[in-house]
Amino acid sequence: MKPQFKTLDQFIIEKQADFPNAKGELSRLLRDIGIAAKIVNREINRAGLAGVLGETDYINIQGECQQRLDVYANEQFITALKKGRECCAVVSEENDEPVIFDSPEPGKGSYIVAIDPLDGSSNIDVNVGVGTIFSIYRRVGNAAIKPYDLLQDGNRQVAAGYVIYGSSTMLVYTTGNGVNGFTLDPFLGEFCLSHLDMMIPDQGKIYSVNEGNYNRFPESVKQYIRYCQEEDQPTGRPYSSRYIGSLVADFHRNLIKGGIFIYPPMIGAPNGKLRLVYECNPMAMIIEQAGGEASDGQTRILDLEVRGLHQRSALFIGSKAMVKKAMEMIELYSEVYQS
């Protein structure tokens, strides 16, 4: 059934009734994120003409060379969130420390946003889909921001979402009441409801993993990849291997078509490589709301203790049956996995 025509703003306002104790702050915050996403989308679409492709001279806390568009996207989201006054702090992949906003008005600044401003940015100069991942938490107290405000576990998220900038630009988000997607209409300049109540198929036929690192994977992950590649008509195998190298793009495809995305622990990255706070946690909230699962290989992602802003984690995320099968392999080869 084709969803009724609604803009993102209209939909957010209607859904505000899901939060009887809220006063519209979360709705305004989500709209601020949508506005910043439009600005970033415009710059991405003209990146080759605007001279903003390429690297800067700065190495971020992840040990990665910042792209110019990383910096631009980061600035746009922080500016939008600061102007909106509903956010008191931003944790970003591009900032070593949290960005704290002064909140002089009583009742303002109730939320903390964790964000990866431009996931997959190293691929942008070859026109590969990139995205923004965001996560929203309610601050614990009304005093000055404390570490416990910033280091909340994934179960404490009040909203999470992502924007994918590709052949069409989409914003997908959840506030804990299902997942909905909005496509940017370039003529209207508005995100319009296009994917109502998104659900991932319980069983997919796509596995997404960087097989270039195969020799560095635990034996359990190697066994699961072999399982995916085996021919078996009753289970529809072999599965198709699809890996873009942008978490948002791979996740979005699998959410719609069914599949599993894997970034395992491996030699050189024993704790995994993705960031728990602003990559794994928001994607885990979305996938669970869409009927899927997310694990680090041993523990549900949303149950993991957050000990640092840039903490890394392994990630197995996607269709429920596929994640469960991967977990069976890990349990079967647990001794090798833990070594």
Image (cartoon, rainbow, N blue to C red):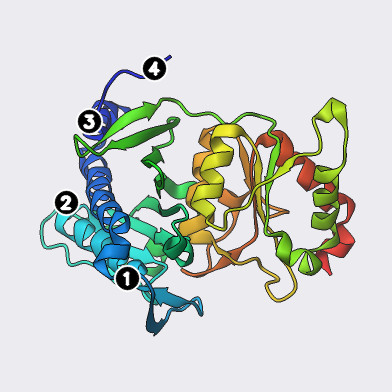
Rounded to the nearest whole Å, what is the CA distance between mark 2 and mark 4? Answer: 39 Å
Q: Which residue in the protein does label 1 denote?
A: 71
Q: Which residue in the protein does label 2 denote?
A: 107
Q: Is residue 338 left or right of residue 12?
A: right
On the question of residue 284 being in view, the answer is: no
Q: Which residue in the protein does label 3 denote?
A: 13
Name the residue: 65% across, 47% down.
Answer: 242
Name the residue: 34% across, 56% down.
Answer: 113
Residue 2, label in figure: 4
Place of residue 142 in the rendered image (x, y in percent of width and height, measured from the top left): 25, 58
Dot in front, 2 or 3: 3
Q: Amino acid at mark 4?
A: Lys
Looking at the image, tell me whether mark 1 or mark 4 is earlier in sequence order: 4
Q: Amino acid at mark 2?
A: Gly
Answer few, some or many: residues within 10 Å of disc 1's Cα (few below 14, many 20 plus, some between 14 and 19). some
Rounded to the nearest whole Å, what is the CA distance between mark 4 and mark 3? Answer: 21 Å
Looking at the image, tell me whether mark 1 or mark 3 is earlier in sequence order: 3
Q: Does 251 appear above or below 93?
A: above
Name the residue: 20% across, 57% down.
Answer: 80
| Quarter placement of the N terminus | top left
SS at mark 3 in the image: helix
| Quarter placement of the C terminus | bottom right
Rounded to the nearest whole Å, what is the CA distance between mark 1 and mark 4? Answer: 37 Å
Q: Residue furthest top?
A: 1
| Residues marked 2 and 4 touching at CB (< 8 Å) | no
Looking at the image, tell me whether mark 2 or mark 4 is earlier in sequence order: 4
Q: Is residue 141 left or right of residue 67?
A: left
Rounded to the nearest whole Å, what is the CA distance between mark 1 and mark 3? Answer: 31 Å
- Quadrant of the image occupied by residue 205: top right
